[in-house]
Image (cartoon, grey):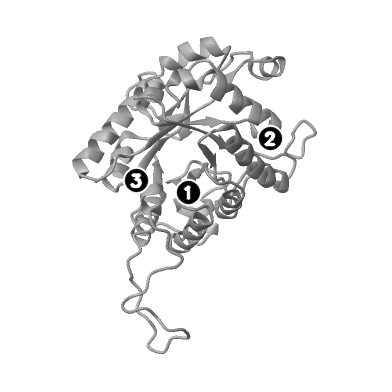
Amino acid sequence: MAMKKIGFLSFGHWTPSSQSQVRSAADALLQSIDLAVAAEQLGADGAYYRVHHFARQLASPFPLLAAVGARTSRIEIGTAVIDMRYENPLYMAEDAGAADIIAGGRLQLGISRGSPEQVIDGWRHFGYAPPEGQSDADMARHHAEVFLQTLRGEGFAQPNPRPMFPNPPGLLRLEPYSEGLRERIWWGAATNATAEWAAKLGMNLQSSTLKFDESGKPFHIQQAEQIRLYREAWKAAGHGREPRVSVSRSIFALVDDRDRAYFGRGNESRDQIGFIEENTRAIFGRSYAAEPDVLIKELAQDEAIAEADTLLLTVPNQLGVDYNAHVLEAILTHVAPALGWR
């Protein structure tokens, strides 16, 4: 299948170091908005942001998504991913509804069980604990199910017989309700089983540069298999629309001396194996950095990119907005057309 959409994915790192263009939370947030504006002008399809708590990175997605929505008009705006262990799903449905309305229905929200965090059991500080006999991953999936249910827009709350304001008839739903947002929720899956679970629930699929090593095969082949299993589960569930699937990659087209200085060393040109939890072996996908003609050949061999309809380019945000806009423009101009973009 030809590639249809290309966006960027920013972690929004900031550090007070003089080497960084992003030295404060203010820099990270304001530059995140500016990069989305620049990406839209370049013709990119999406601006996506990572969510990490207790870290010098982006953490609270909805003010940022709303601000990007107000400053842009066409680009998709999303997350990859919101850690559902930390979320109050009802409050989140209101925030998401409001941000989506401000953006004119352009939100593409990636949610998931989250990754190992900066602190131990950070969600406990937010007031959440898994019920007896359940894991934090179970809790995340439960929060996700409540969130999806709420986004259907059906009334569930008993109205006060003496309300301050007149009510519509029947049970009440949360407002503001944004029509269509339910179909624009994505699940970040690190295993084949959670990809199939996401398909049953009618969520789109986000697969990142990491997944649990389930077969020992190269990363892109395991990821392509995961996507095919997801599509089969989607078909079996009988949903009435085509699902969307994104993969993320670090890809740099070396077109000038700056590019070669930053990324020309080629030291991550193969998959890495590591442990993200004590007893879970994970496989991390390789980075790509090469002259455009070489990149085109290398990317043509990546089975998961071929299977997906959306490619998210992870950007080195601490190098500043101008350089990151250049990184995107180089790929959109010299590489993307050969991948079937536009």
The residue where tag 3 is placed is 203
- Residue beneath label 2, please? 321
| Residue under the point 56% across and 45% down | 52
**Would you identify the image quadrant in which residue 322 lies?**
top right
> Circles 2 and 1: CB distance less than 8 Å?
no
The quadrant of the rendering that contains the N terminus is: top left
- Determine the residue positioned at 60% across, 50% down: 64
Q: Position of residue 204 (x, y in %)?
A: 36, 42
Q: Residues within 10 Å of mark 2 (few under 14, many from 20)?
A: many
Report if the CB atoms under discs 1 and 3 are less than 8 Å apart. Answer: no
- Residue at disc 1, secondary structure: strand
Residue 307 in the figure: left or right of residue 121: left
Query: Which residue shows up at 51% across the image and 38% down it?
Result: 46
Q: Nearer the viewer, residue 136 or 258?
A: 258
Q: Which residue is mark 1?
A: 107
Q: Is residue 80 above or below residue 175?
A: above
Amino acid on which the number 2 mark rests in the picture: Val
Q: From this viewpoint, which residue is outermost toward the bottom?
A: 162
The answer to whether residue 56 is visible is no
Identify residue type, mark 1. Answer: Leu
Residue 92 x %, y %:
47, 59
Which mark's residue is nearer the viewer, 2 or 3?
Answer: 2
> Is 81 on the left or on the right of 141, as rendered?
right
* Secondary structure state at the residue bearing disc 2: helix
Q: Earlier in the sequence, mark 1 or mark 3?
A: 1
Cα–Cα span, label 2 and label 3: 32 Å
Q: Nearer the viewer, mark 1 or mark 3?
A: 1
Mark 1: few, some, or many residues within 10 Å (few <14, many ≥20)?
many
- Give the number of the disc on residue 187: none
Within 10 Å of disc 3 (Cα), the crowding (few <14, some 14-19, many 20+) is: many
